[in-house]
């Protein structure tokens, strides 16, 4: 057939295939092909498109993710020990989304002589005979393995060769893992192949050449860390099909950094399973090169249900707060940027733990800022979240199972104040007994104010003239759990009252690279976000920052 490409369009083939081959679906390691498709990891909320080129005979491969945002080159044909390259958009203080090439050369200790296929190794698969996949007459191949408590099943659907297409065409590959130790599935991923093209004389070398417009420099980071950035974080197919053990190594590192210890082997495996899915989500999200980055943090071994427990805002009904009155003088006094941290009006970032007490942090920290300003910015008095968790049940709050700031404000006004942290005692990350009568009052409230719902100009003015403001947001998305830096914008975020599930503190606002943001203090420790803070986009009231803000008036 010469050097021309033989192409299979999977939709067209349905009418051509009449019977299934019983031959083993093995592809030669010298094959040269181009494939497109998607990687789907439902437990990690990932659907990632790819285009891949593999030239086994000439020892080079290329994967392109997210329609050209990431190019990963494996060049075993370069240098004695091979080389890896990554071309991605880079944003710095002086450039925006400029395509940049990073490279790393293999060494005798760390060779880079493996190239990456998007086809699974099928030596141990069993041909189960003809089967149908979405109307295509295929052969189905299955491999089952047991590894300790784990039972893994690999399923591959392949179109057999015909006279028109004398090669096997991958259609669908699935992995499902079940762990008997904790009695549930621990992993699932799918590769769906959309097109598959075989090159009989090899893929043209120009496909693997990096444009001279992108001069390559060494990948940032020392040694093994540089290799990791290229080998694993940038190459999800490698992690899925090659089983390099990188997830195990990163989980060990995670446990060491965060001092994680587990009760038994079953919990260890369950936590590692959560980590695996969150780890994959982090790196897939970063390959999209959004306006923000995500990172593995101390929450990476938690389940979705556990992370839900940390979002304890529960909207119920309207309250008795005063309306916000925005005068011309207030508008005039509103600067273009504000950060109350630099004035000393914000206490240190805290960690609420696995307790839905975020509302108590939003309440107490908005009062702390208001008290600081009422005292002419002379001193800061830390106030007790535990006081509110323990004592405001009679006003409709539910401790670690959620609450609302206004209910806490009402309790504080009725009972003569909120206790200082020092006098009330340590934060427990749990419900406790109310002992407010034995504590020292740190602040009293005259009233509280509802900032005009949905008005970003009103919120900006309130922050600038009244101090840090308690706000509620939709924090239900995994992207927020692992936010690290940049301006957070989540298109799936809601901004209605019923969408809000987490209480935080707005301590400022500003603009970066032309994008307006709110400066938000969270209560998930300094391991989360940018030392406990996030920049949340003001676009379209994303995630509802301006939907339900409140601040207090101090009673002196």
Image (cartoon, rainbow, N blue to C red):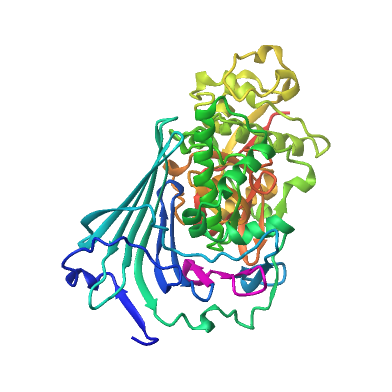
Quarter that holds the C terminus: top right
Report if residue 546 is visible in the image. no
Left or right side of 511 for 165: left
Is residue 215 inside the magenta stretch? no
Is residue 83 inside the magenta stretch? yes
Which one is nearer the viewer's eye here, 86 or 474? 86
Task: Tell me the quarter of the picture where residue 77 sits.
Answer: bottom right
Where in the figure is residue 479, as x and y percent of width and height? 52, 50
Q: Magenta segment range?
A: 60-86
Quarter that holds the N terminus: bottom left
Which one is nearer the viewer's eye here, 84 or 284? 84
Picture residue at 41% right of the left edge, 68% below the top: 28
Task: Tell me the quarter of the picture where residue 119 sits.
Answer: bottom left
Which residue is situated farthest in the right direction here? 378
Picture residue at 16% right of the left edge, 67% below the top: 18
Left or right side of 65 for 166: left
Which one is nearer the viewer's eye here, 249 or 134? 249
Where in the figure is residue 443, as x and y percent of width and height? 71, 27
Where in the figure is residue 123, as x and y percent of width and height? 39, 56
Which residue is situated farthest in the bottom direction here? 2
Report if residue 142 is visible in the image. yes
Tally of numbered discs? 0
Above or below, 87 against 258 in this view is: below
Which one is nearer the viewer's eye here, 460 or 87? 87
Where in the figure is residue 120, as x and y percent of width and height? 41, 59
Above or below, 79 against 529 in this view is: below
């Amino acid at each position: 057939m010469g050097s021309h490409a033989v192409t299979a369009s999977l939709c067209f083939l349905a009418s051509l295939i009449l019977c299934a081959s019983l031959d083993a679906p093995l592809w030669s390691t010298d094959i040269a092909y181009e494939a497109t498709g998607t990687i789907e990891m439902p437990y990690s909320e990932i659907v990632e498109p790819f285009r891949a080129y593999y030239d086994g005979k000439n020892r080079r491969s290329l994967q392109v993710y997210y329609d050209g945002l990431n190019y990963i080159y494996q060049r075993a044909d370069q240098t004695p020990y091979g080389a890896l390259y990554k071309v991605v958009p880079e944003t710095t203080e002086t450039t925006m989304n400029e395509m940049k090439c990073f490279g790393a050369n293999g060494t005798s200790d760390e060779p880079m002589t493996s190239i990456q296929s998007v086809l699974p190794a099928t030596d141990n698969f069993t041909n189960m005979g003809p089967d149908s996949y979405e109307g295509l007459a295929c052969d189905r191949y299955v491999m089952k393995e047991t590894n300790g408590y784990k039972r893994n099943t690999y399923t591959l659907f392949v179109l057999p060769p015909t006279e028109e297409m004398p090669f096997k065409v991958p259609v669908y590959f699935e992995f499902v893992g079940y762990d008997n130790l904790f009695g549930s599935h621990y992993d699932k991923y799918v590769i769906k192949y959309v097109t598959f093209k075989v090159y009989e004389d090899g893929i043209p070398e120009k496909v693997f050449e990096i444009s001279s417009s992108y001069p390559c420099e060494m990948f940032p980071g020392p040694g093994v860390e540089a290799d990791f950035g290229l080998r694993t974080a940038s190459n999800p197919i490698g992690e899925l099909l090659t089983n390099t053990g990188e997830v195990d190594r990163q989980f060990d590192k995670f446990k060491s950094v965060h001092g994680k210890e587990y009760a038994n082997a079953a919990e260890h495996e369950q936590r590692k399973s959560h980590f695996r899915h969150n780890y994959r989500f982090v790196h897939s999200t970063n390959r999209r090169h959004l306006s923000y980055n995500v990172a593995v943090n101390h929450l990476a071994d938690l389940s979705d249900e556990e992370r839900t427990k940390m979002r304890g805002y529960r909207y119920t009904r309207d309250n008795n707060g005063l309306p916000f009155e925005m005068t011309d003088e207030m508008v005039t006094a509103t600067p273009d940027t504000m950060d109350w941290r630099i004035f000393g009006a914000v206490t240190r970032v805290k960690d609420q733990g696995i307790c839905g007490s975020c509302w108590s942090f939003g309440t107490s920290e908005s009062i702390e800022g208001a008290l600081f300003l009422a005292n002419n910015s002379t001193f800061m008095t830390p106030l007790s979240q535990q006081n509110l968790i323990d004592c405001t049940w009679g006003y409709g709050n539910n401790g670690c199972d959620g609450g609302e700031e206004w209910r806490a404000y009402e309790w504080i006004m009725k009972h003569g104040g909120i206790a200082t942290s020092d006098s009330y005692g340590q934060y427990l990350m749990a419900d406790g007994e109310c002992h407010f009568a034995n504590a020292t009052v740190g602040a009293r409230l005259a009233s509280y104010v509802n900032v005009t719902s949905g008005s970003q100009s009103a919120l900006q003015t309130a922050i600038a003239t009244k101090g840090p403001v308690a706000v509620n947001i939709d924090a239900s998305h995994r992207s927020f759990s692992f936010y690290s830096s940049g301006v957070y914008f989540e298109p799936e975020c809601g901004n209605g009252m019923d969408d809000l599930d987490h209480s935080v503190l707005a301590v400022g606002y500003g603009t970066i690279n032309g994008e307006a943001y709110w400066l938000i203090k969270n209560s998930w420790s300094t391991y989360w976000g940018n030392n406990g803070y996030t920049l949340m986009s003001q676009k379209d009231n994303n995630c509802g920052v301006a939907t339900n803000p409140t601040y207090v008036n101090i009673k002196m």
